[in-house]
Image (cartoon, grey):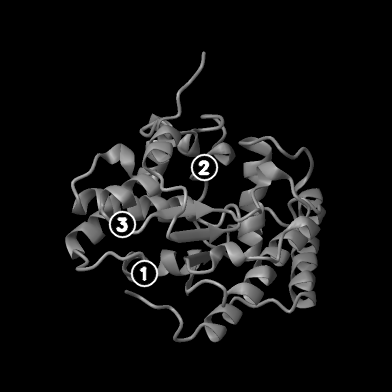
């Protein structure tokens, strides 16, 4: 039976097709959690329907804020692009504001593997093969970050946040994000409510219940916990899945690329214009 995706329809109706702000992330870096945190806060502040919270373009427009859009910026696994096909040209973000969300490389790769094999079915192989692959593996994620290290000066305002920091201090990071997208006079009660609402256990239950009529939070296989969108919700869970050889291979490639997340913070010190 044909199923209508209400979120996509709402987004088409309300979207300007020219967002003011982009939230960019490599797949499985925690963006759904951030999306729901933003949406829940705005739904409370502006008394908007709960079903709008997953439609960021819709809810930011209804809140009379700059239009915010989430994107993987060409790295989506469904596209199956090899790492050499990722574009270094980011002129599309000139005069835009960009939030880049990062996450630990190993945790991202493990989470991406389960997304690829148990939810969107774009890969059929072992986790080792996944890590080595040009379409999904370590070269692709490091190329993605290298592109943004080199292009972080392109947007008019750039904010880098990490999944791990959101875990450690959700109130601080969410406040920073809300201010960056133009929300002022942050309400602490709504902030606390949003964080509690978006707790791991709540989101896991929402997914089981089908609370939101959207594929983004639809269980792959209700009897397979690895197929859930909200899968583990922990930092450092990769140790359960990656062999010592896998971990060494990843670490060696990180050194080869000379990659550090601090490259974002150092080069953009003082550039995150919060208005």
Q: Is residue 68 above or below residue 53?
A: below
Q: Is residue 102 visible?
A: no
**Mark 2 → mark 3, Cα distance in angstroms:** 18 Å
Residue 176: percent from left, percent from top: 35, 71
The residue tagged 1 is 180
Residue 158: percent from left, percent from top: 48, 73
Left or right for 161, reference 92: left
Instruction: Name which of mark 1 and mark 2 comes first in the sequence.
Output: 1
Q: Disc 1 on helix, strand or loop?
A: helix
Q: Disc 2 on helix, strand or loop?
A: loop
The residue tagged 2 is 229
Instruction: Name which of mark 2 and mark 3 comes first in the sequence.
Output: 3
Instruction: Name which of mark 1 and mark 3 comes first in the sequence.
Output: 1
Residue nearer the viewer, 167 or 120: 120
| The residue positioned farthest toward the top in the image shown | 1
| Disc 1 crowd, CA 10 A, few/some/many (<14, 14-19, 20+) | many
């Amino acid at each position: 039976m044909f199923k209508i995706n209400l979120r996509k329809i709402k987004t088409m109706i309300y979207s300007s097709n020219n967002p003011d702000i982009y939230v960019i992330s490599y797949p499985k870096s925690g963006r759904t959690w951030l999306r729901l945190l933003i949406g829940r806060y705005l739904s409370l502040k502006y008394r908007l329907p709960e079903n709008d919270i997953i439609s960021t373009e819709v809810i930011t427009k209804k809140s009379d804020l700059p239009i915010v859009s989430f994107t993987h910026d060409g790295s989506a696994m469904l596209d199956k692009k090899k790492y050499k096909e990722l574009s270094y040209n980011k002129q599309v973000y000139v005069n835009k504001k960009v939030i880049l969300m990062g996450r630990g490389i190993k945790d991202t790769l493990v989470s991406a593997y389960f997304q690829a094999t148990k939810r969107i079915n774009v890969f059929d192989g072992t986790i080792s093969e996944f890590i080595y692959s040009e379409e999904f593996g370590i070269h692709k994620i490091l190329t993605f970050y290298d592109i943004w290290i080199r292009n972080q000066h392109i947007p008019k305002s750039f904010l880098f946040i990490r999944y791990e920091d959101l875990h450690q201090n959700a109130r601080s990071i969410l406040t920073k994000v809300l201010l960056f997208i133009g929300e002022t006079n942050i309400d602490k009660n709504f902030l606390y409510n949003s964080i509690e609402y978006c707790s791991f256990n709540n989101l896991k239950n929402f997914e089981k219940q089908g609370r939101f009529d959207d594929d983004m939070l639809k269980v792959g296989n209700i009897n397979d916990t690895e197929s859930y969108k909200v899968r583990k919700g922990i930092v450092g869970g990769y140790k359960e899945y990656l062999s010592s050889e896998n971990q060494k291979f990843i670490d060696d490639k990180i050194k080869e690329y000379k990659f550090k997340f601090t490259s974002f913070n150092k080069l953009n010190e003082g550039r995150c214009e919060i208005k």
